[in-house]
Image: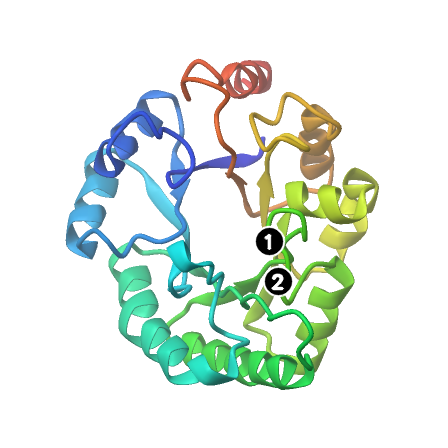
Amino acid sequence: MPRFAANLSTLYPEYFFQDRFRAARQDGFEYVECQFPYDHPAARLAELLGDNGLRQVLINAPAGRWTQGERGLAALPDKIAEFRHGFEALALPYAHALDCSLIHVMAGVIPPGTDPEPFNATYLDNLAWAASLATSHGIRILIEPLNPFDVPGYLLSLQDQAYQVLSMVNSPNLSIQLDLYHCQRTEGNALERLPNDLASGLVCHVQIAGVPLRHEPDEGELLHEAVFHTLDSLSYPGYVGCEYHPRAGTSEGLTWFRNWRSRQV
């Protein structure tokens, strides 16, 4: 059975963040992920993980001024110092404190009409630097294409682009975070290409949500049970992050999760 991780940045919005750990555990999750844990002391989050018997599997590196539209810093030539400081002073220490082995590095939004080359070069340089630094800490770096409907102008939108980046950086410590919601919205046929993506050995983390509304995965055009069967048939060893926005109450919307678990026992 896939190892599902509750994304505490999107699930359980009815609770304060620190109360979401207990709620996830009560609903049967053993693993959690979140986007940006930096508003909360790392020691306190580690305590919440331990108290609730949870494992943190993924965090994002600091991604800039989110409320002002920044969606990552790694590709922005004028933000190199800020990106590297945030990665080294925040992302790595938090990953250590939470015993988390995966850090997603967001690229950033490219202003329309600008030459993409300086952004691409900065992105590759920063990824090579981050992957090298993280290697000595036992932490893997992930990149993720985001769909242009939700994040217009994001540097990375296609799966093939992500593979090209990995080839150019050429670091064994850099992998792909395959968000099937983003993949389906941008390219379609996410389920059909899933076996090849996993067979590449370059996908280290998978995320799910219903398409196109990003609610529970039991609605929309991407058949969640087929996805789970495919992951199981290919013996996918990683985690499946549940990064969606509940239709109503989070627990009430977890029927898909409870049904799948009951059938696997």
Task: Label 2, secondary structure: give it.
Answer: loop
Which amino acid type is marked by label 1? Val
Residue pictured at 41% horizontal, 51% vertical: 35
Locate residue 170: give its quadrant: bottom right
Residue drawn at (75%, 48%) of the image: 186
Vertical position of residue 159 compared to residue 136: above or below = above
**Residue 168: x %, y % from top left:** 69, 81
Q: Secondary structure at mark 1?
A: loop
Q: Is any part of residue 202 visible from this angle?
A: yes
The answer to whether any part of residue 136 appears in the image is: no
The residue most toward the front is 113
Q: In the displayed structure, does residue 87 sit left or right of residue 114?
A: left
Say if 33 sits above or below 152 in the image: above
Q: Which is more toward the observer, 50 or 122?
A: 122
Q: Are marks 2 and 1 in contact (CB under 8 Å)?
A: yes
Instruction: Specify few, some or many for label 1: CA neighbours under 10 Å numbering under 14, 14-19, or 20 or more.
Output: some
The residue drawn where x is 65% and y is 58% is 145
Q: Position of residue 93 (x, y in %)?
A: 27, 67
**Residue marked by disc 2:** 154
Q: Looking at the picture, how far across and down is residue 265, in whole percent?
A: 54, 17
* Residue pictured at 59% horizontal, 74% vertical: 172
> Which residue position is annotated with label 1?
151
Q: Amino acid at mark 2?
A: Tyr
User: Which one is in front, 131 or 211?
Assistant: 211
